[in-house]
């Protein structure tokens, strides 16, 4: 149960009040875990990243400047994205690459076909991407970063960011088309 408004919650956390910290955690843990999971792809690692991210939030909340509704969530989201990226870099998982000849030509998927695929299935397809592709895809799609911003953040060149996004999209299109084909075949058998 949410007891305080966002601004009051920040002020109480800045004073080191454990009840406020607990409320902050309870209010945002689910959303921040989803961010960690989107990048890490596994729940055990995601829970570890959630813990690490909240340690960073609590240790740096004194520097947070409230700028209106949603600013706390946005600030925390950046911390959790950066925590996940640090983990991937530390584990050198960003080097995972799929050769071009293993990626089918980029086919089109109709928007109406996508609307028939459950969101959890689409997110599973994203989690199955190689780490580098998944990371660039997440940063571009969900964090709305440009290739220039992604390149600076990941210490790669812009062309590499663009190439990884294109490959991620190609792999996703292939997975979506396979799913649609399987569903169509299942429908004919049933």
Image (cartoon, helix red, strand yellow):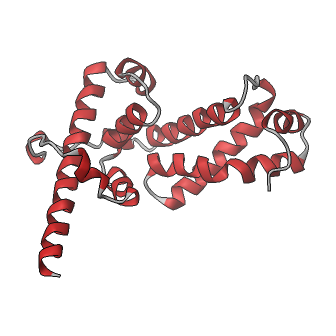
Left or right side of 28 for 183: left
Q: Is residue 6 above or below residue 118?
A: above
- Quarter containing the N terminus: bottom right
Q: Nearer the viewer, residue 12 or 115?
A: 115
Where is residue 143 drawn, in percent x and y? 47, 32
In this view, which residue lies farthest toward the front? Answer: 112
Count of numbered marks = 0
Q: Nearer the viewer, residue 53 or 20?
A: 20
Q: Residue at x 48, y 40 (%)?
A: 90
Q: Residue at x 38, y 53 (%)?
A: 123
Q: Nearer the viewer, residue 14 or 49?
A: 14
Where is residue 152 drawn, in percent x and y? 42, 20
Where is residue 168 drawn, in percent x and y? 26, 41
Left or right side of 175 for 2: right
Q: Residue at x 17, y 51 (%)?
A: 174
Q: Residue at x 38, y 31 (%)?
A: 140
Q: Is residue 22 above or below residue 141?
A: below
Indicate the quadrant where residue 178 lies: bottom left
Where is residue 112 drawn, in percent x and y? 25, 49
Q: Is residue 148 above or below residue 9?
A: above
Indicate the quadrant where residue 57 lies: top right
- Quarter containing the C terminus: bottom left
In this view, which residue lies farthest toward the bottom? Answer: 190
């Amino acid at each position: 149960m949410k007891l305080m408004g966002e601004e009051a919650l920040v002020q109480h956390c800045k004073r080191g009040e454990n009840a406020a910290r607990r409320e902050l955690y309870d209010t945002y843990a689910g959303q921040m875990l989803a961010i960690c999971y989107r990048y890490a792809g596994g729940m055990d690692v995601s829970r570890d990243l959630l813990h690490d991210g909240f340690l960073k939030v609590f240790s740096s909340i004194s520097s947070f400047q409230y700028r209106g509704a949603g600013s706390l969530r946005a600030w925390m989201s950046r911390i959790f994205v950066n925590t996940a990226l640090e983990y991937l870099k530390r584990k050198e998982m960003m080097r995972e690459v799929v050769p071009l000849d293993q990626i089918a030509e980029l086919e089109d998927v109709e928007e109406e076909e996508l609307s028939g695929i459950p969101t959890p299935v689409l997110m599973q397809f994203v989690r199955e991407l190689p780490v580098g592709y998944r990371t660039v895809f997440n940063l571009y799609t969900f964090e709305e970063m440009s290739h220039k911003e992604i390149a600076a953040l990941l210490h790669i060149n812009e062309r590499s960011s663009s190439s990884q996004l294109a490959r991620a999209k190609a792999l996703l299109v292939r997975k979506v088309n396979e799913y649609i084909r399987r569903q169509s075949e299942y429908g004919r058998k049933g």
